[in-house]
Image (spheres, helix red, strand yellow):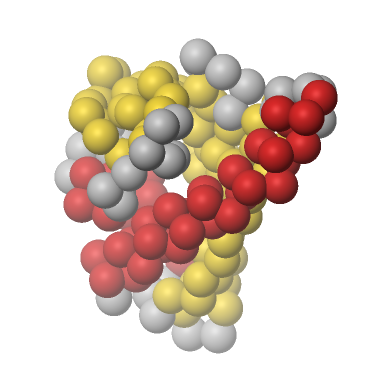
Amino acid sequence: MAKVSASSSLTISAAPDKVLAALSDYETVRPRILPEQYRDFAVVEGGQGDGTVARWVLQATEKRSRNVLATVSVSGATVTEKDANSSMVTTYLVAPSGSGSSVTTTTEWTGAGGVGGFFEKTFAPLGLKKIQAQLLQNLSRQVE
């Protein structure tokens, strides 16, 4: 089994602290920036930053969905979501970029083995990158 990874980045015309605060707000901001592939989003505990627990269904393709129960940690300029139901971990790294911010989101998980694993490693990141890019565009519209 190999690691599967997808990553997307965007430069946003907003200060890093504002972007980090928005990414850490699972009560009001997160529901507004999630693309349509995220269904049934709900905060289970907390809602603001470190220690937040949220759940959702990620409909990656027409036939493939994943029930996510994520625990959030915030350390420095990084927001991390660890899924209790799988090996999936998503990070959002916010860095200064000129007068704004650069945001990079990366999702990694342990993929299947064999032929199925080959196809997962080849095609899953392509679809996930589109979802990530939409989330970052929505974030940009929210904070700019």
14 to 103, vertically: above or below: below
Left or right: 63 in relation to 25: right
Q: Is residue 3 visible?
A: no
Residue 12: x percent and y percent? Answer: 43, 75
Left or right: 16 in relation to 29: right
**Residue shown at 60% from the left, 44% from the top:** 124
Q: Residue furthest top?
A: 85
Q: Residue furthest bottom?
A: 98
Say which quarter of the image contains residue 26.
top left
122 to 115, vertically: above or below: below
Split into 4 quadrants, where in the image is the N terminus? Answer: top right
Name the one closer to the observer, 74 or 70. 70
**Residue shown at 38% from the left, 57% from the top:** 135
Residue 132: x percent and y percent? Answer: 47, 55
Name the one closer to the observer, 120 or 78. 120
Residue 117: x percent and y percent? Answer: 74, 30
Say which quarter of the image contains residue 5.
top right
Q: Is residue 81 visible?
A: yes
Residue 29: x percent and y percent? Answer: 23, 50
Name the one closer to the observer, 76 or 54. 54
